[in-house]
Amino acid sequence: MDNRMLCAAACLVLALSGVCVGEGILPAGRLSGAVAGTVMFSTTLSPPESPFLSVSWSFKGENIITSTSTDIIDPGHADRISLDRATGSLELRGLVLEDSGEYTVTIIPDGGLQKQGKTVLQVYALISGASIRTPSAVLIEDKSSTNMSCEASGSISTRLWMKDGQPLRPDGRISLSIANRTVFIQPVHSSNHGTYECRVSNPVSSVTVAHDLTVNFGPHNISITGPSAAAPGQRVTLQCTAASVPPANFTWMFNGNETRVNDSVYIIERLDAERLGNYTCTASNMVTMQENSTVLNLRASCTAPCWCVSLLLLSALTLTGLL
């Protein structure tokens, strides 16, 4: 049996035993690179005592470099590759999208079996120019619908939407297009008001862009903060609040009679019996054209005799100029 037959038999034995020729000389998994960037195809080999007889790399089946006693380099790669002759590793510079594909290294050691490895490179254009586009329309709760589109240049692998720092998930009002490019909200709700972010990414770059979505709503949850009972002569402050976009306008009524207080705060400088009763706050929204009201009943904090004595004392102090 001549040497060629012995070599073929040895290769067959290795293959049948599950040890493929060259298995493991390139790390598993794909490589990623950025346009205009650099990538290193690193083998797992250590420099041998005797230099390799031959190292060659091919791309999509076409040889790009073969190194023996001299180097033969494909003209299209001449200024973009460097070979580490000791380990067979290859550096590729000035990446372009067309560099994506399968790369194969073949190494012939001095006195050993041929080694081979394969890997795949994916080149991506960097993400740039990201923006969120949405129709310029006034949005009113439960009456309007809208959409937001996440646009960007480059090789886009994923789009991830966030709202107020939390992942945006579809629900009865929110839906997403294929690849998450567009968010549809039909119809808008007060809960949709807030800051939206779109993160556009690929394995080599990522850009996040934000957009504040204004949903006009309310007034909701109107309430009056203040004492429900007070003593005569006490200064009483009533504060009216409501959830509203834009902020609500407030008006007050006392026992059904409208006052001139166009503010969220109603102040009673000195409480007396004539100021006990129902205080009504009405909140109105000039965009949604809605309004809501709430009532606080202000009572005396002590019994009638207590009020009589207190009022007489207040009157005496007022007459003597002490108040």
Image (tube, grey):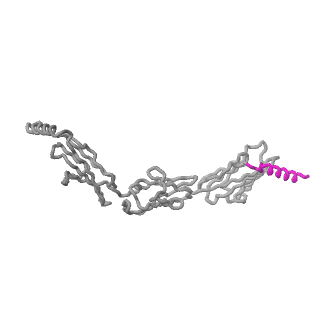
Asked whether 12 falls inside the magenta stretch, the response is yes
Task: Tell which residue pokes out farthest to the right in this image.
Answer: 1
Vertically, is 83 above or below 151?
above
Would you identify the image quadrant in which residue 186 lies?
A: bottom left
Q: Please report the bounds of the magenta region as a residue range.
A: 1-23
The picture places residue 308, in percent across and down from the top left corner, at 13, 39
Quadrant occupied by the C terminus: top left
Q: Nearer the viewer, residue 98 or 237?
A: 237
Asked whether 211 falls inside the magenta stretch, the response is no
Q: Is residue 193 left or right of residue 304?
A: right
The picture places residue 299, in percent across and down from the top left corner, at 21, 44
Q: Residue at x 56, y 54 (%)?
A: 202
Q: Nearer the viewer, residue 32 or 211?
A: 211
Q: Residue at x 78, y 42 (%)?
A: 49
Q: Nearer the viewer, residue 146 or 74?
A: 146
Secondary structure mostly taken by the magenta-highlighted segment of the chain: helix
Would you identify the image quadrant in which residue 144 lies?
A: bottom left
Q: Is residue 42 left or right of residue 269?
A: right
The picture places residue 24, in percent across and down from the top left corner, at 72, 48
Q: Is residue 37 left or right of residue 194?
A: right
Task: Tell which residue pokes out farthest to the left in this image.
Answer: 319
Tally of numbered discs: 0
The picture places residue 215, in percent across and down from the top left corner, at 38, 57
Q: Residue at x 70, y 48 (%)?
A: 43
- The answer to whether residue 276 shows anywhere in this view is yes
- The answer to whether residue 69 shows anywhere in this view is no
